[in-house]
Image (cartoon, helix red, strand yellow):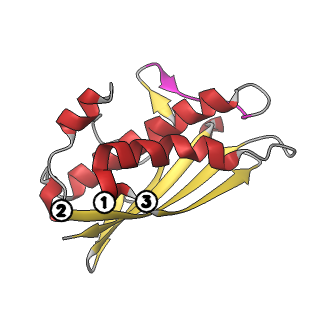
Amino acid sequence: MLQDISAKLKELGHSLPAAPTPAANYVPFKISGNQIFISGQISSNEAGLITGKIGQELTVEEGVAAAQTCALALLAQANAAVNGDFSKIKSLVKLVGFVNSTPDFTDQPKVINGASDLMVAALGEEGRHARSAVSAGSLPLGVAVEIEAIFELA
């Protein structure tokens, strides 16, 4: 089971943002059985959306940073799903990451490692997860990265 991770995120140089609101006709998360399915969270920071194609306008390192913002938004949604009580979450089960990249770009896993590494650093062993990292010709609003998640409830 997880505890409040705000202190761990602060130690890592991050803070838990407010859970983003949906941009269309969907819910940000759905609890089914003992799992929380979190809708895709897009790359954004305090300056706004992080847009562009990795391998063209953005470097791999910038993509990694964009993926980290998605991970923080996923944690914010998980926090909202359990009403701020992370002890209700047993573990992160899976991430599915989409990278807005050029047709010849092949480092999608390196980009999505930004989210995976942050999850493991913040959640410990309970943050280890199954994962997909795929390329996309474009993503909503031109963002660089979108990631969805599945968490298991305790």
- Where is residue 126 drawn, in percent x and y? 30, 60
Q: Which residue is mark 2?
A: 1
- Identity of the amino acid at label 1? Glu
- Residue 140 seen anywhere in this rendered image of the structure: no
**Residue 19, horizontal then vertical, whole percent:** 30, 42
Q: Is residue 141 visible?
A: yes
The quarter of the displayed image where residue 90 is located: bottom left
In terms of depth relative to the viewer, which is nearer, 63 or 7? 7
Which of the two labelled residues, at mark 2 and mark 3, occupies the earlier sequence position? Answer: 2
Res. 63 image quadrant? top right
- Real-space Cα distance between discs 1 and 2? 8 Å
Give the residue at x 52% y 40%.
114
Circle 1 is placed at which residue position? 126
Residue 137 place in picture, x, y as percent: 77, 48
Return the x and y of residue 39 as percentages of the image width and height. Answer: 44, 58
Q: Which residues are magenta?
A: 47-54
